[in-house]
């Protein structure tokens, strides 16, 4: 029994051993494999960090691109809608870009301007200036400028200042520059106007200085005569004969008439300078007006035995300012008497040409040199010479005649021959019926 029990225990023990088998031994992991695994883990972590950074950079890049697009749109808007005309040109002066203001100035659509040479809108004689301007821009990094004339599609001209600088664009191989056009047309007009005004002021000042000199000289002589004759009459009248009194009185009268004529001309000139002389036209008979002037001048003409003839058509009436025309006749007649020698003739005549009347004052005087004719009607030259009897003048009469005739929408001119006389002619308009 004991033997069977032992055999049974042995067999069960063997069964258990068969079931469980021998105990498994855990394999040892090499150290190098562990280090490689750690490196992989660190690499993965680094890749994750870099991925995160790349994602942030992508976000920043996208934001930068959006900002760049906004900036570009702002630049485009500023370029397109700027009130200043802008052009983008290459080294050959060919238009690559142009804004709306420039398109408007040249009178052409932008798509028609692209590819055209800029100097096709400038005068040919200014090509060298433009070419030098473009060359300077691409040969230095600073801004350059020049002044040119621009001629647009309808031949309208603009005086402009060009300001240009080279553009830095690494993305495009072609070098380009941007040029702004500053319209100087109005500035130049004002500048020219100021220069003309300045020149006129200089001429006026020179004329006034000359007037003061003439006035001082011409007033001195008549006043000396007046003082001398009036003193004789005041102190010695009782001892003077009747003929002497008449002579002195006559001389006094002539001196006073000379002074009055001078002062009247000065008054008219002064009023014209201040635009105070009012143009007041009316209808009047020309023949009667000439007769009234002849009566005033008869005494001066008689002293030189000069014959005065009124050959104006008695039926002619004119539409003019009567006072101005009277002054014209008076100055021309006094002038003719002054330069006509003894026993000469002065004829006043008229000729009708449609609605215009030509009136002439012709004398048999000494005539005028050709080079002096252009000086007669100018205030800035004030030309004067002594008459055949030593008469003096101010030189104001003929310039005033020109002013008065032109105020009445007429013209005045002179033809003359030395030694044979002169013929002054002016025009007035016929009376309005």
Image (cartoon, helix red, strand yellow):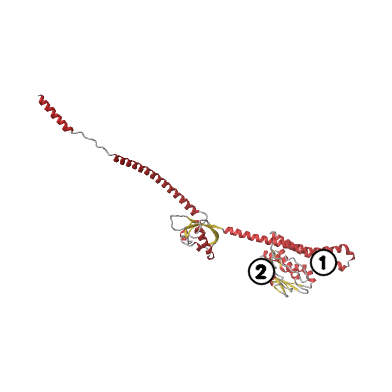
Say few, some or many: other residues with alpha carbon within 10 Å of mark 1 (under 14 / 14 to 19 / 20 or more): some
Residue 278 visible in the displayed image: no
Q: Which mark is residue 38?
A: none
Q: Position of residue 63 (x, y in %)?
A: 42, 46
> What residue is rendered at 63% in x and 59% in y?
194
Q: Is residue 111 above or below residue 411?
A: above
> What residue is rendered at 67% in x and 71% in y?
352
In this view, the residue in front, 350 or 262, is: 262
Q: Position of residue 365 (x, y in %)?
A: 74, 73
Q: Nearer the viewer, mark 1 or mark 2?
A: 1
Quadrant in which the N terminus appears: top left
**On the image, which quarter does residue 281 sit in?**
bottom right
Quadrant in which the C terminus appears: bottom right
Mark 1 sits on what residue? 251
In primary-sequence order, the first of circles 1 and 2 is: 1
Between the residue at mark 1 and the residue at mark 2, the CA separation in whole angstroms equals 41 Å
In this view, the residue in front, 65 or 221, is: 65
Mark 2 sits on what residue? 356
């Amino acid at each position: 029994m004991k033997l069977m029990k032992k055999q049974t225990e042995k067999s069960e023990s063997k069964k258990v051993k068969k079931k469980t088998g021998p105990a498994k031994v855990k394999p040892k992991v090499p150290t190098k494999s562990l280090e490689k695994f750690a490196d992989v883990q660190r690499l993965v972590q680094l890749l994750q960090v870099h991925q995160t950074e790349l994602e942030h950079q992508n976000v920043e890049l996208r934001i930068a691109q959006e900002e760049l697009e906004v900036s570009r749109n702002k630049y485009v808007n500023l370029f397109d809608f700027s009130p200043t005309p802008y052009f983008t040109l290459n080294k050959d002066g060919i238009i690559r870009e142009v804004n709306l203001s420039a398109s408007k100035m040249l009178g052409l659509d932008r798509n028609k301007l692209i590819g055209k040479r800029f100097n096709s809108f400038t005068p040919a004689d200014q090509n060298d200036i433009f070419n030098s301007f473009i060359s300077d821009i691409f040969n230095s990094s600073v801004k350059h400028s020049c002044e040119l004339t621009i001629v647009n599609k309808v031949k309208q001209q603009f005086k402009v200042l060009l300001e240009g600088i080279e553009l830095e664009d690494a993305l495009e191989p072609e070098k380009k520059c941007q040029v702004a056009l500053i319209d100087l047309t109005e500035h130049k007009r004002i500048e020219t106007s100021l220069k003309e005004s300045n020149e006129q002021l200089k001429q006026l000042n020179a004329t006034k200085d000359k007037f003061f000199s003439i006035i001082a000289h011409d007033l001195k002589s008549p006043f000396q005569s007046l003082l001398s004759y009036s003193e004789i009459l005041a102190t010695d009248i009782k001892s003077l004969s009747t003929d002497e009194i008449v002579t002195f009185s006559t001389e006094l009268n002539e001196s006073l008439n000379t002074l009055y004529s001078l002062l009247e001309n000065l008054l008219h000139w002064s009023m014209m300078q201040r635009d105070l002389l009012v143009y007041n036209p009316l209808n009047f008979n020309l023949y009667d007006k000439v007769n009234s002037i002849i009566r005033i001048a008869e005494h001066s003409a008689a002293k030189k035995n000069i014959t005065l003839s009124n050959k104006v058509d008695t039926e002619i009436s004119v539409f003019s300012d009567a006072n101005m025309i009277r002054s014209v006749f008076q100055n021309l007649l006094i002038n003719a008497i002054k330069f006509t020698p003894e026993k000469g003739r002065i004829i006043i005549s008229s000729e009708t040409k449609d609605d215009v009347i030509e009136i002439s004052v012709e004398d048999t005087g000494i005539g005028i040199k050709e080079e002096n004719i252009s000086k007669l009607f100018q205030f800035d030259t004030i030309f004067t010479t002594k008459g055949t009897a030593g008469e003096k003048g101010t030189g104001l009469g003929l310039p005033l005649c020109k002013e008065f005739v032109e105020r009445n929408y007429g013209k005045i001119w002179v033809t003359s021959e030395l030694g044979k006389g002169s013929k002054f002619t002016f025009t007035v308009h016929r009376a309005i019926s």
